[in-house]
Each structure stands twice: as C-alpha cells, then as structure tokens.
Image (cartoon, rainbow, N blue to C red):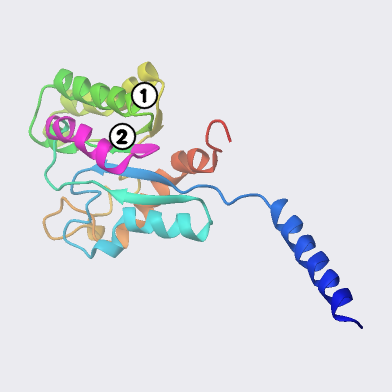
Amino acid sequence: MCPEFLSRMAARILLGLLCSLAVLPAPAAERTVMVFGDSLSAAYGIGVNEGWVSLLSDRIRRNQLPWKVVNASVSGETTAGGLRRLPEDLKRHSPALVVIALGANDGLRGQPLATTRSNLESMIRLARAAKAEPVLIGMMLPPNYGIEYAREFRELYPGIAKSARVALAPFLLDGVAERREWFLPDQLHPAAVAQPRILDNVWPTLEPLLRQRPRGS
C-alpha cells in the first residue's frame, strides 16, 4: 500500500473515533451535598470514617452518583449557632443540597420551641436563596424532658416540613434511640455500630433528590 493511501485510511479512522466520542453523553457535573448538623452528624467519639455522613459518601460513590459530600457539622451546635454560620458555609461550599440536622441540642437545653422553629425556617430560606435544596432531619427527645415538651418537639419537624414544603427524614435515630448498647458510655452519642442504621434512616429521603437531574440539563 502506498503511503498516501495509508495516510487517508488513518485520517478516516481518527475521524470515526472523534465522531463516536462526540455522541457519547457528557459525564454529569459533580454537585455538593452539605450535611449541616451537630455531634450526631459530626462522628463524635468515633472515627470520622465511621460516621453516617462518611458512610453516605461511600454509598453515593458505590451508586456512581455525581455528588460529593461535605460535612459541615459541629459538635454542640444549636439552631441559633447554625443560623449564624450557615451563610458562610453556603458561600464556601456552594452546595446544591443542604441537609439540616439540627435542633437536638436546643431540646436538651429546653430552648423555646418557637425560637427553634424560627431558626430552622430561616436556615431553609437561606439555603433556597443560595439556590440549594434544603432537607430537614427530624429529631426527638425522651419523655423525661417533659412529656408535653417532648411531644411538641417531636411535632416541630413535620410541621416545618409541611409549611415550608421541604423533604423530611422523620427521625435521625429511628431504631437506634431504644438500643442503649448502640451508644457510647455517655448514652447520648451513637457508637459506630449504629451509624449504618442512621444512614438508612436518611437515605430514603435523600436518594430521590440525589438521583434528580439538575435543572436545565
């Protein structure tokens, strides 16, 4: 074969490869889900990689979803503290999804529920103003904090979710709270053994949102 023929053949093969690549769908751009919670989400007392937020990142990776996870949780955080620092974290991480998992410390301190509600609603508005989809994680208190207060606290989260039209995971510690052997010696913070169950409590609410295509795509 003459060199000119070989050159034309190589050009055709290259052109064919380029055309085949052009029709392949572009990989989805990676977006950020930011978990914004307290010690229950900050892996308090256990290894960072053992916490449910790290397990969420692992599950997203296994499912080949185009998301990365940022854990902006701070141990001891209240809704008031979260509200103060949320604008900066939204600016820093530019999340498309914000998982708000706060309020437990408000309840443990007996904070007025009207204040907790106002703070959570303000965080939802801030997330939306930053073009992020908020998700609310429900919390509960044991009855020894006062039966009426515990009941009103439990009803706080579904009430906010309904009025603000936000996705809700009903209770972060569902199936965990009653398993005292799954807690650290302080009996407040779940041990590593409880973290997969905590993730399973959140996943059914998060998964549909993680699988949604970005607007305009």
Using the numbered discs, state the Cα–Cα distance from disc 2 to disc 1 in whole angstroms: 9 Å
In the rendered image, residue 205, in percent from the top left (x then y), is placed at 45, 39
Residue type, mark 2 in image: Gly
Quick check: 105 left or right of 59?
A: left
Residue lying farthest left? Answer: 109
Neighbor class of circle 1 (other Cα within 10 Å; few <14, some 14-19, many 20+) is many
Q: Quadrant of the N terminus?
A: bottom right
- Say which element carries label 2: loop
Give 76 or 91, whichever is nearer the viewer. 91
Hey, which quadrant is residue 150 in on the image? top left
Q: Quadrant of the C terminus?
A: top right
Instruction: Examine the residues drawn in magenta and state their main secondary structure.
Output: helix
Give 97 or 195, whichever is nearer the viewer. 97
Q: Residue at x 27, y 29 (%)?
A: 154
Quick check: 132 left or right of 207?
A: left
Give 148 or 114, whichever is nearer the viewer. 114
Compared with 148, 103 (above or below) is below
Residue 118 shows in the view:
yes
Magenta stretch holds residue 135: no
- Residue tagged by mark 1? 161
In the rendered image, residue 45, in percent from the top left (x then y), is placed at 16, 60
Q: Which mark is residue 122?
A: none
In the rendered image, residue 56, in percent from the top left (x then y), is placed at 39, 54
Residue type, mark 1 in image: Ala
Tell me which label, 2 or 1, sits earlier in the chain.
Answer: 2
Q: Residue at x 85, y 71 (%)?
A: 9
In the rendered image, residue 89, in percent from the top left (x then y), is placed at 23, 39
Q: Which mark is residue 138?
A: 2
**Which region shows up in magenta?**
80-98
Q: Residue at x 26, y 37 (%)?
A: 91
Q: Residue at x 35, y 48 (%)?
A: 175
Neighbor class of circle 2 (other Cα within 10 Å; few <14, some 14-19, many 20+) is many
